[in-house]
Image (cartoon, rainbow, N blue to C red):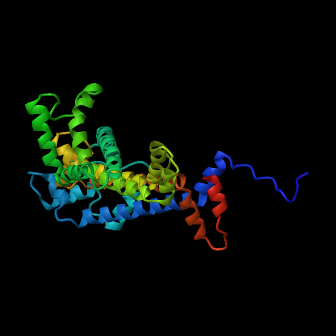
Amino acid sequence: MTDPRHPRAAPPPSRRGRLRAALPVRYVLRRLAGTAGLLLVLSLAVFALLRLAPGDPARTLLGTRSATPEALASVRAAHHLDEPLVTQYARWLTDAFSGDLGTSIRTGESVAAALGDRLALTGQLVLAGFAVALLLGIPLGVLAGLRARRPVDRAVQSAGVLALSTPAFAGGLLLIYVFSLMLGWLPAYGPGTGGPDRLLHLLLPGATLGLAVTAVLIKLVRAAVVRELARDHVTFALARGVPTRTVLFRYVLRGTVVPVTTGIGLVLAYLLAGTVMVEQVFALPGLGQLLVQSVTFKDVPVVQAEALLIAALVCLANLATDLTHPLADPRLRTDRRRRRPGRSTPTALTEGQA
C-alpha cells in the first residue's frame, strides 16, 4: 500500500507519449492545413501573374507562321486560352489534384514527364550544395563563436562575407577557370553520364551553390554559440570544473539546435531558388534551365507547375523545420500550451520530459 506521505513517483512517459506531447495531432494538422492554404494562394498568384504578363502565348506558338485571326483562334481553342481566367484556373487546379499538370505549349509533351526528367538532376545539385553549406558553415560558425572577437573569428567572418557578396555566376566562372582550365581536375559543364561521372560533374556546381549560403550559416551558428556561452548554466558548469568538451557538446551545441535548424530551413529554400543561375552557368539541364526556357516562350503550364513544385518544396522544408523545434527544445512546447485558455502551465511536465 502506498504511503500518502510519500506518493509513488509517476513512471516516465514512453517515447510515443513524449512525441505526442511535443507534437499534438491538432498542432500538426493545423500546420498542414496552413501549408496547403499557402500553396493554394501561391498557385493563384503565379497563375494571375503569368496571365497578366505582356505577350500572347498563341502568337509565340505560331512562331514564324502567319498569325491570321483564324490561326490564332484555333491555337487558343486548342489550349483553352480563350476561356475566362477563372475557368482556366479551375480547370488547371482540378487536373492538378488528379495528377495531370497539363501539356507543354512549347514542346507538346506532358508537363509531369518534363519535370520528372529534370527533377532528379536538380535534386542532386541541391543536395551537393546543401552538403557544402553544412560541412563548411557549421564547423566554421562554431569555431568563430568559440574564438569570438579574435583573429580567427575575423578571418572566418571576412571569408564568409566575401563568399556571400560574390554573385553565383562570378563564383562559378572563377571555379571553372581554376579547377577546369588551369588545373584540369574537374569537368566544366554538363551533367555527366551517371554514377561517379555525375558526381564529378556536380562538384563545381554544388560548391558554387553551397558557398553562396555558407556565410548565412556561419553567422547564425556563431551568434548562437556566443549567446549560449554567456548563459549562467554554462558559466556555472565551467566554474565547477566540467570539461570544456563536455560543456560544448552537452550545453552549448544543444542550445544552438533551434536557431541553426531555422537557418538550415532558410538555406535550403535559397538553394532551391538559386539553382536557376548555377544551371545556366554549368549547362545543366535541370529545373532551373527549364524554367528559363519556359518563361522565355511563355509556356504557362510548365511555369505554373514548376513554380508550384518549388513553392511546395520550400513550404515542406519550412514545415519540417517548424515540427523539429518542439522536439529539440521542450520550452517551445510550454510556450505553445500557455497560449491555450483554461490550461495550467505544464512546467513540471516539460521539465521532466526534458
Q: Residue furthest right?
A: 1
Depth check: give the residue in front, 343 or 49: 343
Point out residue 48 in the picture as x, y percentages from the top left corner: 29, 66
Q: How many marks?
A: 0
Q: Is residue 274 left or right of residue 250?
A: left
Identified at 47% across, 54% down, the residue is: 255
Identified at 24% across, 46% down, the residue is: 211
* Observer able to see residue 47: yes
Q: Is residue 72 left or right of residue 326?
A: left
Q: Is residue 343 left or right of residue 87?
A: right
Depth check: give the residue in front, 31 or 340: 340
* Observer able to see residue 285: no
Q: Is residue 173 left or right of residue 224?
A: left
Identified at 17% across, 65% down, the residue is: 54
Point out residue 189 in the picture as x, y percentages from the top left corner: 16, 35
Point out residue 114 in the picture as x, y percentages from the top left corner: 29, 42
> Is 26 placed above or below 217 here?
below
The image quadrant of residue 194 is top left
> Is 343 placed above or below 330 here?
below
Identified at 25% across, 42% down, the residue is: 286
> Is 203 placed above or below 196 here?
below
